[in-house]
Image: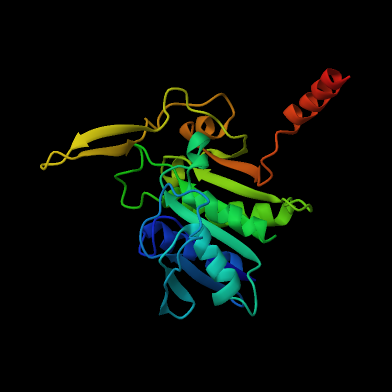
């Protein structure tokens, strides 16, 4: 198996080394793991691509490259440049330092890479490590991801639920904010929503009197509805959320079709 890995924390992020270890287990002794990751941190860029400017790509070592661009750019570079003669069988993104549960998923460059991969009909999984008081100061804050990452990916590959249409399924996996021994298991969950915890801005003045705005995040320890991703994470479980790149709300679409027909008659 040939695996392409990337992230949004940058080429030197510790979570990328964790993901490399996980990918090596999945690829096996006869497989290949290729890294194409951003040259600097790209957190919060979601599914952004560098459409209006070129991006520099640099070879770091054998099968390892950095790109001056977003995580989605890195996936494109991996598929159509670095691995163009033999495209990857699987794309793994992460392991993100911090959770991409609930509404965080909408901003995540980690998930943006998985979205780009699945658009090209390549199986794609985003992995993130929730941080909190029970693991952030541990010797290895990524211990839960390190210990359970390969097991979760093997399960997803075994059950083979990726869809067959134009828009296919990818997976958002979040490891709980605890050490490996405290993980209680894994749960399949929908995306949650943290009430009163959205992003905002914090104004400040420079010494020269110029006004700047900093993006300000909300608290991450607010549980979402029962049995949704952040709720199970905060209770010690790994969340596995199947997602789809088709943004259509089919329920609203059907209702509006009926209402428009009634109005037209």
Q: Position of residue 111 (x, y in %)?
A: 53, 49
Q: Outermost residue toward the front?
A: 264
Which residue is at 74% across, 54% downward?
Answer: 160
* Depicted 258 relative to depicted 104: above or below: above
Which residue is at 50% across, 38% downward?
Answer: 101
Q: Quadrant of residue 56?
A: bottom left
Depth check: 38 or 177 in front? Answer: 38
User: Where, quadrant-wise, is the C terminus in this rendering?
Assistant: top right
User: Where, quadrant-wise, is the N terminus in this rendering?
Assistant: bottom right
Q: Position of residue 185 (x, y in %)?
A: 56, 40
Q: Outermost residue toward the left?
A: 207
Q: Position of residue 194 (x, y in %)?
A: 48, 27
* Depicted 190 relative to depicted 172: above or below: above
Depth check: 214 or 147 in front? Answer: 214
Left or right side of 262 for 114: left
Using the rendered image of the protein, determine whether residue 28 is visible from the camera's viewpoint. no
Depth check: 37 or 188 in front? Answer: 37
Which residue is at 37% across, 30% downward?
Answer: 219
Which residue is at 31% across, 52% downward?
Answer: 139
Q: Quadrant of residue 238?
A: top right
Numbered marks: total: 0
Using the rendered image of the protein, determine whether residue 182 is visible from the camera's viewpoint. yes
Left or right side of 265 for 198: left
Q: Position of residue 12 (x, y in %)?
A: 35, 64
Give the colouring mode of the picture.
rainbow
């Amino acid at each position: 198996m040939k695996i392409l890995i990337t992230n949004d924390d940058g080429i030197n992020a510790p979570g990328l080394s964790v993901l490399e270890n996980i990918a090596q287990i999945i690829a096996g002794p006869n497989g290949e793991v290729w890294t194409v990751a951003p040259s600097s941190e790209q957190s919060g860029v979601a599914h952004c691509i560098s459409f209006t400017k070129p991006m520099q790509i640099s070879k770091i070592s054998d099968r390892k490259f950095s790109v001056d661009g977003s995580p989605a750019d890195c996936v494109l570079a991996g598929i159509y440049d670095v691995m163009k003669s033999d495209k990857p069988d699987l794309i793994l993104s992460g392991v993100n330092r911090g959770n991409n549960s609930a509404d965080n998923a909408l901003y995540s460059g980690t998930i943006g890479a998985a979205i780009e991969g699945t658009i090209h009909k390549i199986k794609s999984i985003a992995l993130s490590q929730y941080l909190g008081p029970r693991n952030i100061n541990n010797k290895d804050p990524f211990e839960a991801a390190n210990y359970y990452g390969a097991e979760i990916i093997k399960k997803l590959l075994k059950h083979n639920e990726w869809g067959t249409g134009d828009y296919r399924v990818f997976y958002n996996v979040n490891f709980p904010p605890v050490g490996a021994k405290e993980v209680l298991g894994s749960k399949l969950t929908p995306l949650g929503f943290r009430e009163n915890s959205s992003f905002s801005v914090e104004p400040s003045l420079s010494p020269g009197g110029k006004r700047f705005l900093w993006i300000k995040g909300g608290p991450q320890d607010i549980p979402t509805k029962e049995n949704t991703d952040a709720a199970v994470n905060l209770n010690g479980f790994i969340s596995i959320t199947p997602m789809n790149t088709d943004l259509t709300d089919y329920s609203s679409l059907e209702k509006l079709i009926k209402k428009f027909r009634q109005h037209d008659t």
